[in-house]
Image (spheres, coloured by chain):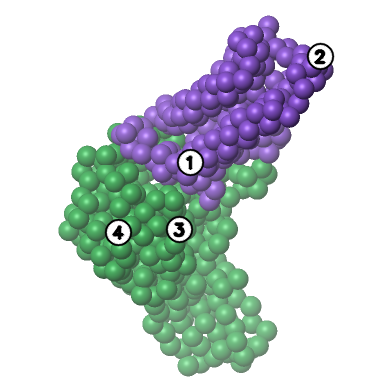
Amino acid sequence: MENVIECTNLTHRYGSKLVLNDLNFIVKKGRIFGLLGKNGMGKTTTINILMGFLRPTSGQCMVLGENSHSLSPKTRTRIGLLHEGHLAYDFMSVTQIEKFYASFYPAWRKEFYYELIDKMGVSHDHKLSKMSCGQRSQVALGLILAQNPELMILDDYSMGLDAGYRALFLDFLQAFVQENKKTVLITSHIIQDLEKIIDETLIIGRQKVLLQMTIREFMRTFHRYSFQSSRSDLMLEQDDFIKNYENIKNKFTVYTFATVDDCQKYLQNHGIEFADFQEIPMTLEEAFIGLTGKY
Amino acid sequence: MYKSLLYKEWLKIRYFLLGYCIIFLFIAGYLFLDIRHMLTMGKPIEIWLYIIQYKMLFYRIVKFIPLLGGILMGLTQFGPEMTKNRFRLSFHLPLPEIKMLLFTIGVGSGVFLIINLFFYGGILLVVAKYFASEIVISTAKTILPWFLSGMAGYFSTAAITVEHSWKYRIILILVAGGLISLMLSERGYEEHVFVIWQYIIIIVMLAVTIIFPGYRLRKGSK
């Protein structure tokens, strides 16, 4: 399968502060790829490099076969960008902005745009500056759908949106992507919404990749176990085996990729007595917090 | 595609242009009434004394209007592009970035130049209504640097607005401020007549200055 995005040895510093350290990932054609990570882990930096607005300290990102830093105008017609905060020319009205963008994109489908606009019941001469954040997000998405690009990069689409607008956004996006076989790279702070839409995820932690795999595989192989221990001072070592743990009043919760048997063996080998050992199912958001930690 | 860019610029500047035209019509009207009042109420010898002897620039009210207009025009055009990182929208359009930037500034300066030519002519017509051709020619030569300062103000404001590093922004403000104050410093008539071409060269240089902050902005370097 063809790689639409290919980042190799991506490293970036802001002055002496290292933000990305040797990041490698690929996004294959036709996939919906979630770039996840807690605040300050380098998501926006990665997106800015992918969009060509930031030159990495070292390494490179290839987007549709071209270096992201010098994308040709022709390649840019194949990429739809949703900027953080649903950035748009808000001095324009609904009709004006559609009219403005239409001539730039040969595959322009204005019916996609107006379908979303009409769903909101907004008049076509409504100024973007007078719209709510939710309404602006639909305008921004509508413009990207009308552009009909091969690759969509959606930076924090959920910012400022209530549950209704988030659902509307994702429903339209999902229908469009499935119907037209598009590739999407998406970031969001609201992980739970992404569970039903993304195929694959890359979770970045402090200067390292925590994991890259399909959502199905992640949710199948990543586990949360809880057990009671009589030792209140018990400290577990976070390593390749134990990804994270919590201890609240002698009730331990462990996050790991190990099976039940392997986890129990691990505890026994480390001389840890336990009782009431059980696996607790997780949502994607809980798994994300389990992997990255609450703090 | 460039027609679309033209459309976007028109949407941004149309209200400013309307406001600028109204202000200039008001200024021209005021100048007309002021001269008429002066000629009606004053004695010929007094007028001669003030205009010729004391070098009183009776059209001084026009002096800072083109500069103010240029600054506001630059802000109207480039302010919305630079707030909230909106320049990213333009830089993702499928056009060569620098060409697009030059097109944008070309549209702005072209429109501003045409309007100022009308105002320049309008002021001279008002003067010609009451004074001899020698004074009209002298007025044309005296107020030309003021209008040139408007163009310089426009190009400088555009470059300063696009510039995202405060260090370079301050340098640009100092350089542009110095050059513009040269164009506006006079104590009498026609004092800049021998340096008009130099001013035009300075304006052309200010016009292309935007390429540098624009390029650095696109490439994400400070």
At label 3, which amino acid type do we have?
Ser
Q: Which mark is residue B18?
A: 1
Alpha-carbon distance for marks 1 and 4? 25 Å
Given this view, does label 1 or label 4 mark the residue nearer the observer?
A: 1
Number of labels in the image equals: 4
User: Furthest-top residue in view?
Assistant: B194
Q: Nearer the viewer, residue A154 or A278?
A: A154
Residue B17 drawn at (x, y percent) = 49, 38
Q: Chain of mark 3?
A: A
- Residue occupying the point 60% across, 87% down: A248
Q: Secondary structure at mark 2?
A: helix
Q: Which mark is residue A129?
A: 3
Q: Chain of mark 2?
A: B
Which chain corresponds to the colour purple? B
Q: Do callouts 1 and 2 mark residues in contact (Cβ within 8 Å)?
A: no
- Colour assigned to chain A in the rendering is green
At label 1, which amino acid type do we have?
Leu
